[in-house]
């Protein structure tokens, strides 16, 4: 495919800031690029737009496949659009990097949303390590903020790999669950429950309403057993039916209560500052690692040292120390 001519940084910047979707898409493609020359331009672009970021409500949404994430995002997202807000939906799907397939699937997800001019949907890039993808998602989020989106959803598949990264880039983390047959706490890692600012028990419709209400009580009790959040927020459990548009207003209300409480207590800004520090370290880790493995001298020696470790001539830490000394000398 013929590569389109690259825009100038000024063009990217003015396009993104004016909310031009084509410019925004192209800026995201630039951020996702693995070409070094693109990375430099992308970094400059992020510098340029940084002052215009930070104004959205950043929401992480997770849950196992089948829980109803796309249906929920479609219904909840449309409710947000009806309030006159602009919504961006970014997805991180670690499965797509490993297998080329995707848990999130190729089915047309969020059909109505994808047709609205006030919504912007972008799946995660593939073919890179999760650390890299998370970086790119965060930068994409910043671009969307600069483009004027008021609410940003970052969706993950809830299988435990990307949730920590997402938790570290959002203000509010929503876990979607189902009322199971008795075994309510199965299926999702306890660590993920601890991250949640709210749980929404989906598919609370028809005969399932009673189960959902029972599960709501159970989860609310289970959450009380976790150590209290440092930010003073007690996670809430709501029930909803994404399919029938029920209970979604309560979830928005929970989010508004959270925002009010967090802003009043100062926790909102504290959290964002801590997240910035986290991403500073992540960026350092990411680039050091990339640079190390790309280093030609290290590359030449790598298989020799792998063999030494394999044959028992060197133990793993010796070999690692030797290679690191080579790199830093
Ligand atoms: P995802 O894999 O988490 O994105 O889940 P989907 O949104 O694709 O939903 C999986 C299935 O559950 C689909 O057949 C949906 O129609 C169904 N579903 C989603 N939300 C609800 C709901 O609130 N009630 C009911 N009864 N079914 C739902």
Image (cartoon, helix red, strand yellow):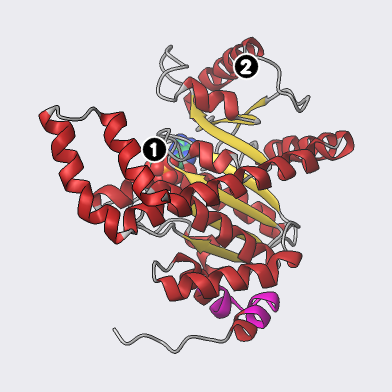
Label 1 CB, ligand 1: below 8 Å? yes
Residue ID at (54%, 52%): 74
The residue identified by callout 1 is: 66
Residue stretch in magenta: 13-25
Q: Is label 2 in a helix, a strand or a loop? A: helix
Residue 261, above or below 284: above
Q: Are marks 1 and 2 in contact (CB under 8 Å)?
A: no
**Quarter residue 269 falls in:** top right
> For the N terminus, which image quadrant?
bottom left
Observer-nearest of 30 and 91 = 30
| Residue 263 image position (x, y, % from top left) | 84, 40
Observer-nearest of 209 and 151 = 151
Residue 91, above or below 40: above
Residue ID at (59%, 29%): 195
Q: Sort mark 1 into few (<14), some (14-19) or many (20+) by Cα contacts within 10 Å.
A: few
Q: Is label 1 in a helix, a strand or a loop? A: loop
């Amino acid at each position: 495919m013929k590569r389109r001519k690259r825009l100038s940084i000024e063009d990217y910047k003015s396009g993104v800031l004016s909310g031009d979707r084509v410019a925004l898409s192209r800026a995201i493609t630039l951020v996702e690029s693995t070409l070094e020359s693109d990375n430099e331009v992308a970094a400059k672009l992020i510098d340029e737009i940084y002052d215009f970021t930070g104004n959205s409500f950043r929401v992480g949404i997770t849950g196992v496949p089948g829980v109803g994430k796309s249906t929920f995002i479609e219904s909840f997202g449309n409710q947000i659009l009806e309030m006159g807000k602009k919504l961006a939906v970014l997805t991180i799907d670690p499965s797509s990097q490993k297998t080329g397939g995707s848990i999130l699937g190729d089915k047309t997800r969020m059909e109505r949303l994808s047709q609205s001019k006030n919504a912007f949907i972008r799946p995660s890039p593939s073919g890179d390590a999760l650390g890299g993808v998370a970086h790119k998602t965060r930068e994409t989020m910043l671009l969307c903020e600069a483009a004027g989106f008021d609410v940003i959803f970052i969706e993950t598949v809830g299988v435990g790999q990307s949730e920590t990264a997402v938790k570290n880039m959002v203000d509010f983390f929503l876990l979607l669950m189902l009322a199971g047959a008795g075994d309510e706490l199965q299926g999702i890692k306890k660590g993920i429950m601890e991250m949640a600012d709210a749980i929404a028990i989906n598919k609370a419709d028809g005969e399932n309403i009673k189960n959902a209400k029972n599960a709501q009580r159970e989860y609310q009790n289970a959450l009380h057993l976790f150590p209290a959040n440092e930010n003073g927020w007690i996670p809430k459990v709501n029930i909803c039916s994404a399919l029938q548009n029920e209970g979604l207003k309560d979830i928005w209300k929970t989010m508004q209560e959270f925002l009010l409480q967090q802003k009043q207590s100062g926790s909102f800004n504290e959290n964002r500052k801590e997240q910035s520090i986290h991403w500073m370290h992540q960026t350092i880790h990411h680039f050091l690692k990339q640079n190390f493995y790309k280093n030609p001298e290290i590359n030449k020696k790598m298989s020799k040292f792998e063999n030494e470790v394999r044959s028992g001539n060197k133990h793993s830490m010796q070999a690692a120390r030797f290679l690191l000394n080579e790199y830093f000398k």
